[in-house]
Image (spheres, rainbow, N blue to C red):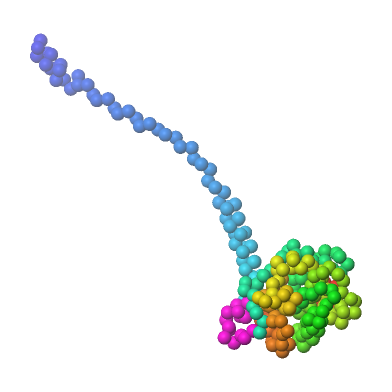
Amino acid sequence: MSGSNLFAAGDPRNVKKPEAPAAPLAMTVHEMQPPDVTAVRRTSVGRWKMLAVLAVCAAPVIASYLAYYVVRPETRTNYSELILPPVAIPANLPLRDLQGTPVDAVSLHGQWLVVTVADAACDERCGNNLVLMRQLRETLGREKDRVDKVWLVTDQATPSEELLQASGASALLVDRAELSKWLAPAAGFSIEDHLYIVDPLGQWMMRVPADPEPSRLKRDLDRLLRASASWDQAGRQGSTGQP
């Protein structure tokens, strides 16, 4: 009987098999929707196209400034004082024509400008500047239509018709305090002492010395016109009301 029990205990059929390990827990991850690659790519391409267009438009202007300011500085002996960086005309500069109608400052873009500042009475200094501006433009020959003469009248009065006709300048009314936020004289001078040169982008970029030498000032203008010949064209002359 005991032998029977031993046999039974040693019988492999009676050996308890180990339990199978529990199956690992299954975790379900809900996949996130992939980003819309096409939309992202379209936005990126559009942005690069816009930047490329801006670069192409700005390249001639940048190149001319580099040629004038950087590439050949040793051959450039400008007479007038360079304003670096140039100062853009404020979009909210309160300009008015002689009838009192507001004039958008952006309308001054598109031409090289030689600007004088004076009240309507126009003293001797003002008269000399107006004469110089007129003579200077005429000496430019076929390039003269790329340059406009602008008289900024600071006392809100209207200059005489005779003076306007004689000067041939485009006269605009502007508050002197507001104008001083854009144009500024050299130390020790007043804003009326100088002529100011503004580029076709509407940026003040040169201040002419008081009582300038006409021949040296003309050389400055000649250089500017040559440097910008590839991108600046005549076309805005007279748009502010005077020939």
Residue 162 is one of the magenta-drawn residues: no
Residue under the point 75% across and 73% down:
110
- Expressed as whole percent of the image width and height from the top left, the position of residue 12 reads 18, 22
Residue under the point 61% across and 85% down:
76
Instruction: Check the image and report above or below for 228 versus 44.
Output: below
Where residue 195 sits, quadrant-wise, is bottom right
Residue under the point 65% across and 79% down:
81
Where residue 124 sits, quadrant-wise, is bottom right
Instruction: Check the image and report above or below for 191 versus 41.
Output: below
Q: Name the outermost residue toward the right.
A: 161
- Expressed as whole percent of the image width and height from the top left, the position of residue 8 reads 15, 16
Where residue 231 sits, quadrant-wise, is bottom right
Q: In front: 53, or 225?
A: 225
Start and end of the magenta stretch?
A: 64-78
| Residue 127 visible in rendering | yes
- Expressed as whole percent of the image width and height from the top left, the position of residue 155 reads 82, 69
Q: In front: 190, or 198?
A: 190
Residue under the point 62% across and 66% down:
52
